Amino acid sequence: MAAGPAAHARGTAPARASEAGAAGAVPGWQPVATGVTARFRGLAAVTRHTAWVAGSAGTVLRTSDGGRSWRDVSPPGAGELEFRDVEAFDGRRAVVLAIGEGEASRILRTDDGGATWTETFRNPDPRAFYDCVTFFDRRHGLAMSDPVDGRFRILSTADGGRSWRVLPDEGMPAALPGEAGFAAGGQCLVSAGPRDVWLATGGGSVGRVLHSGDRGLTWTATGAGIPAGDAARGVFGLAFRDRAHGIAVGGDHRADQPSPDAAAVTRDGGRAWRTATTPPPAYRSSVAWLPHSRSAALAVGPTGTDLTTDGGRTWRTVDTGSYDTVDCTPDGGCWASGAQGRVARLVRHAG
């Protein structure tokens, strides 16, 4: 389901932290100009230099020079679509997901840097609403829909998103009343390794994380400890640095509501979750492990960015700017994006 009304963009100052990863570098957000006002909830960071963002009004941008310039590669005629997720394999090949009921949910793929796009899936079922997409490798990926007939629906691809099929739902646990996913930052469905995938939920009586070790054929569900019980509350974003170690973030996306226990951690692949002892102070929609760190991660949301240096047990706010999603790359790059065309890169200064 959609994540609710857009939050107003806020000014941002550089994020500062004294213990951000093994090198002890001091990170800071450096905003880059995109020249547009779309809200970018979809972000795919490929390298320190290359990134894709996807958002409202069918907008897709790509940079290959670290954000100094952006190319508008929006699919023609997509102005009515709401892109909420983008997965990029490199600077030329990417898949974007549009959300919404029925035919509003679509998947498009490009193989030429966005010069041309091919629609590879259009949802034919008015009961389905697709929220997120993830890939295990360049060929195998999944997309998820809110429950249909009482179970979350999973799409599968084995050719890099060029074709999709609905997986059988016999191995999917029954959804709780009111349970759904949040299309808030492209992290309600995430993978690690060749077969493991996790699905974040809210809206039901408890916020849950579902795990599959066989690319979406069979699933188990576990309460994550992040409060739900309302259509605006639950688990919004997930990040796993390997098959075992994961962080969940969320809360209540309404600005006037508190978000206690807005983060949780797992060390066993999601079989058990423990809420953070010092959680972020407010709702967070996205989280990412810092590159080459076993203990440092960033969580972002409309009211700020929080840093953990102990694997998610304690968090402290390091920035008050508004971002919806964050993504990091193996070569040490981290990017964030959000409302009013906002995109930023994480830069490191001498400590």
Image: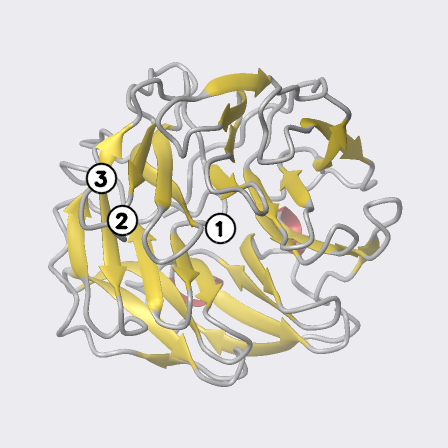
In this view, 135 is above or below 199: below
Q: Which residue is mark 1?
A: 186
The residues tagged by marks 1 and 3 sit, at their Cα atoms, a distance apart of 21 Å
Instruction: Say which quarter of the image contains residue 253.
Output: top left
Which of marks 2 and 3 precedes in the sequence? 2
Local crowd size for mark 3, using a 10 Å CA cut-off: few (<14), some (14–19), many (≥20): many
Tell whether 66 sits left or right of 175: right
Q: Say which residue appears at 21% left-offset and 46% top-offset.
A: 179
Which of marks 2 and 1 precedes in the sequence? 2
On the image, the x and y values in percent for residue 44 come to: 62, 55
In this view, 111 is above or below 186: below
Would you say the residues marked 3 and 2 are in contact, meaning their CB atoms lie under 8 Å apart?
no
Residue 151 visible in this rendered orientation of the protein: yes
Residue 60 visible in this rendered orientation of the protein: no
Quarter occupied by the C terminus: top right
Q: What amino acid type is highlighted by mark number 3?
A: Trp
Q: Say which residue appears at 65% left-offset and 43% top-offset.
A: 334
On the image, the x and y values in percent for residue 122 come to: 47, 73
Q: Which residue is mark 3?
A: 273
Residue 128: image tag: none
Q: What amino acid type is highlighted by mark number 2?
A: Ala
